[in-house]
Image: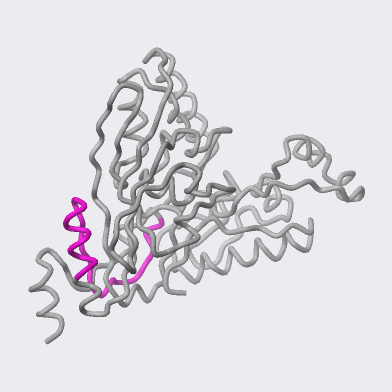
Amino acid sequence: MILNKFIEKLPGARENVLLKDHTTYKIGGPAKYFFVAKNKESLLNALKISKEFKLPVFILGGGSNLLISDKGFNGLVIKINIHNIEFIKTKAIVGSGANLTKLAYLSAENSLSGLEWAAGIPGTIGGAVYGHAQAFGTKISSSVESVEAIDLKTLKLKNFSKKQCQFSLKKSIFKKNKNLVIISAILEFKKDKEKNIKNKIKEFLTYRKTRHPIDFPSAGSTFVNPEIKINDKKLLDKFPELREYNKSGTMPAGYLIAKCGLIGRKCGNAQISGKHANFIINLGGAKARDVLTLMNLAKTKVKKTFGVDLDTEVQFVEF
């Protein structure tokens, strides 16, 4: 059987692993095969073997910003567990599987500032670079010096400078080119007192606890906050807060969704959060199709009400 040959070639690979157990949404069907890559060598080996067996591959990090179909993934899912962290003066060499919150605290302990905003995000450095993560006015690109990645087609390694990463609004070259898999990154920080850094971390964590629905599974923010201005006078008179958002140049997706009357809207066991409308939460046992229905509803209503096209921040698998 092909299954036995594949497992034999790739020790540690497992069959029919439920992906909901590996995502922050707690949603997702089974992976045909599932493998944890703990270093660069095991990742390369898994990719070579998957090529040999002509298996489609999906790379999984921390499982946030991700909605996986209820039918799962008909191929090999490789979970990146390369989480080495090494500090050299004001720089850090970080494996793509390193947890963002852990990295933020370790940076603080080394009196290095730059990642305070990332504390509380349940993702990895690889995912943050991939989706150009940002919060509280700071972007991951502010700390990136270079990124090491592997091309799934050629299996060759390549280093990308910050410029070559092509960072834009919640995007990067790695998000545009699905064949590029992030292995590690070199980050550069600024020196500051440990106490100052940890105070900032505490401040941001408090904000998230009070403003975000962290008691329920979710993928984090559902939509990108569009960098636009709304100039329709009728809308500005009806929604005066828009004038303030126009000044900043960024329109909060959660505000737009809330003003469409969608707070608390449910589909199955998925719900647009009453705490923050840009979060669609899993109340328990929600299906991917339920979440997708609410996403489409929010996009339709916001377009009709404000004339704004919402761009989904969440990555879709097998839809």
In the image, 298 versus 89, the foreground residue is: 89
Percent x, y for residue 132?
A: 50, 46
Q: Residue drawn 59% across and 63% down?
A: 295
Tell me the quadrant of the picture where the N terminus can be found.
bottom left
- Whether 81 is drawn above or below 46: the answer is above
Q: Nearer the viewer, residue 318 or 209?
A: 318
* Label tally: 0
92 over 289 or under it: above or below: above
Q: Pick out the residue farthest to the bottom.
A: 1
The answer to whether any part of residue 62 appears in the image is no
Any part of residue 135 in sight: yes
Residue 267 is drawn in which quadrant? bottom right
| In this picture, residue 189 sits left or right of residue 263 | left
* 291 over 112 or under it: above or below: below
Given residues 279 and 318, the one toward you in this image is 318
In the image: residue 131, left or right of residue 275: left
Compared with 17, 272 (above or below) is above
Tell me which segment is drawn in magenta: 25-48
Residue 310 picture location, percent across and down: 66, 58
Residue 46 position, x and y percent, is: 20, 65
Q: Residue at x 23, y 39 (%)?
A: 84
As for residue 260 lying within the magenta part, the answer is no
Q: Is residue 36 magenta?
A: yes
Residue 7 in the figure: left or right of residue 266: left
- Whole-percent x and y of residue 234? 91, 50
How is colour applied across the structure in the image? one colour
